[in-house]
Amino acid sequence: MPIDPNYETVIGLEVHSQLLTKSKIFCGCPNKFGADANTQICPVCAGFPGVLPVMNREMVNMAIKTGLAINGTVRELSVFSRKNYFYPDSPTGYQISQYDLPIVEHGEIFIDLPDEPKKRIGVTRIHMEVDAGKSIHEGIVGASWVDLNRVGTPLLEIVSEPDMRSSEDAGAYLKKLRAIVRFLEVCDGNMEEGSFRCDANVSVRRYGAEKLGTRTELKNLNSIRNVMRAIDFEVDRQIDIIENGDKVVQETRLWDANKNISRSMRSKEDAHDYRYFPEPDLPPLTIEPSQIAGIRATLPELPDAMAKRFQDEMGLSEYDAGVLTASREMSSYFEDANQVVGKSGKKNAKATANWVTGELLGRLNKEGLEIENSPVSAINLGKLVALIQTGEISGKIAKKVFTHMFDDGGDPQTIVAEKGLKQVTDSGSITAEVDKVLQAHPEQVEQFRGGKTQVLGFLVGKVMQATRGKANPAMVNSVLKEKLG
Ligand code: ADP
Ligand code: MG
Ligand code: ZN
C-alpha cells in the first residue's frame, strides 16, 4: 500500500502466548480446550472466597526458556501484581499479572525481510499473567453466558519496543516470534484459535521528528494478514487526521476483518486506572542462577541458528532459510526430504528448498493446508527431486508428477513408470525425433545455416513437443547442433 512518504510509521506489538503447560497457572485443572462449558474449573478458577493460588513451576520454566531464546535478561527476583478491573468473564475482579518487575527484560528478535538485511527489534519485557474466561453472546437473546474454562490459562505477554517501521516489519516479527515459541514447544502459535494473540500499537510522525506520535492500539487481529492490513489502514487514517489539522486520539480500536476497517472501542486506559499493587497471595518469585543455567542447557536449535546452518552448509538464500525455519514442521519436512535427495552437495539442497518453498507451499497455500497435513510426504517429495537431479525426469514433467502426487497420492517412481513419463535419454530415439523435425521444417534449417542461430530454440521446442516433454533437453540440443552443423 502506498503510504505518504512524509510520514514515518512506528509500531510496537504486544503478543499474548498461551502456554502449553499440563495444568493451569494457579490450580490443578487441566489446561485444555474444547470441553463443555464450565467443566474444567475448580474453586480457584471460579474465584471463590478464601482460595489461594499456587504458582505453576512449569510455567515459570517456560517463561525463562522463552526469555533466554530471545537473549533476554531473566530477573532473579520478579513480582506478581494485581491488575484490577471488572469484567464478567473474570470472577475475581482482578487479573494476576506482572507489572514493574517482570520475569524477563531486554530481549531482541531478528526479523527476516526479502532483499533486506536482518533487522533487530527490541523486546522490552516478557511477563507472566493469567487468562480470563469467555463471554458468549451468540445465539442467546436477552442475556450472555460465561464459560470459565479458559480462566487460569497461563499466558506470556511479550512486549516489543516501538522498533517496527512498516506492516511488513510487524508481519516478519510475528512470524519469527511464532517460530521461536513453536521451536521451544511452549505455545502452539495458532492465531486463528487465539492461542497466539497480537495487539498492535501504531503511531505516525513526520520524518525527522524525534518525539513519537500519539498511538492507538488495535485489537481483534487473528491472523498475520489481518495485523498487516489493520496497520496499513490505521497508518492511512492517522495521516489523514493529521493532514486535516486534527489530532490523533489515544484509544483502543477494534479491527473488523469483514469490512476491512477499524472502529473505536474505548479510550485508552492508563496504568493508574488499574490500581496495580503487589499480589498479596503470591510471594515474590526468586530464580536461582543454577535454574537459569539448567534451562539454558536444554534450549533446542532455534530458528536463526538453524537458518544460518541452512545457509552455510546448504547454500540456501537468507530468505529461503527463513521460510524453511518458520516452524519445526517446516524445517523437519525440508530436512527429511533433503535426506532422501541425498547429501551430496549444495545443488541438491537448493533444488529441494526450491521445491518446498515453490511448488509445495504454493499448492498448500492454495488449498489452505499446513505443511503437517501435506498430501505429499517429505519422503515422496525427496524422491521426486531425486528423479530430477539424476536426470530421470525433467523439471517440467516433475511438475505434472507432483500434481498427481498431490491430488491422487502415490510415490513418484510408480507414477513416472505408470504414465510413461520417464525422460528419453536414448540417443537413437532422440536422433529419430530430431530427423523428423528437421524434415518438417526446412525453412528454419535454411535460416540456421544462413546464420540465424536463434531458430535453434524453435527446433528444440518442436522436438520437446513431439516427445511430450520427455526428451532430455541437453541431448536434443547437442544432437540438433550436430545435425545442423
Ligand atoms: P500498555 O500496557 O498501556 O499498552 P505499554 O507501555 O506496555 O503500554 O506499551 C505497549 C506497546 O506500545 C509497546 O509495544 C510499545 O512499544 C508500544 N508503543 C508505545 N508508544 C508507542 C508509539 N508512540 N507508537 C507506537 N507504538 C508505541
Ligand atoms: Mg497494551
Ligand atoms: Zn482450577
Image (cartoon, rainbow, N blue to C red):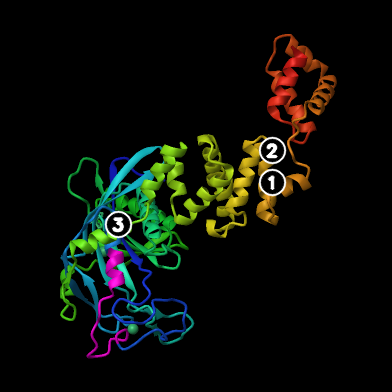
Three-letter code for the amino acid on which mark 2 is drawn = Ile
**Please, what secondary structure does the residue beneath circle 3 have?**
helix
Residue 401's disc number? 1
Residue depicted at x 30% and y 61%: 65
Q: Quadrant of residue 254?
A: bottom left
Q: Which mark is residue 393?
A: 2
Give the mark, 3 or 2, whose residue is nearer the N terminus: 3
So how many labels did they put on this image?
Answer: 3
Tell me which residue sits at (28%, 61%) in the image.
Answer: 295
Q: CA distance from mark 2 to mark 1?
A: 10 Å
Question: In the structure shown, which secondary structural element does the residue marked by tag 1 occupy?
Answer: helix
Residue found at the very far top of the displayed protein = 450
Q: Residues within 10 Å of mark 3 (few under 14, many from 20)?
A: few
Q: Is residue 340 above or below residue 461?
A: below
**Mark 1 packing: few (<14 Cα in 10 Å), some, or many (20+)?**
many
Based on the picture, tell me whether residue 180 belongs to the magenta stretch. Answer: no
The magenta region covers 44-63
Image region (quadrant) for ligand 3: bottom left
Q: Which mark is in front, 3 or 1? A: 3
> In this orientation, does residue 374 appear?
yes
Residue 80 coordinates in the image, percent (x, y):
19, 72
Say whether residue 317 is visible: no
Q: Is mark 1 within 8 Å of ligand 1?
A: no
Q: Tell me which amino acid carries mark 3.
A: Ala
Q: Amino acid at mark 1?
A: Val
- Give the residue drawn at x 69%, y 44%: 400
Which of discs 3 and 2 lies nearer the camera? The answer is 3
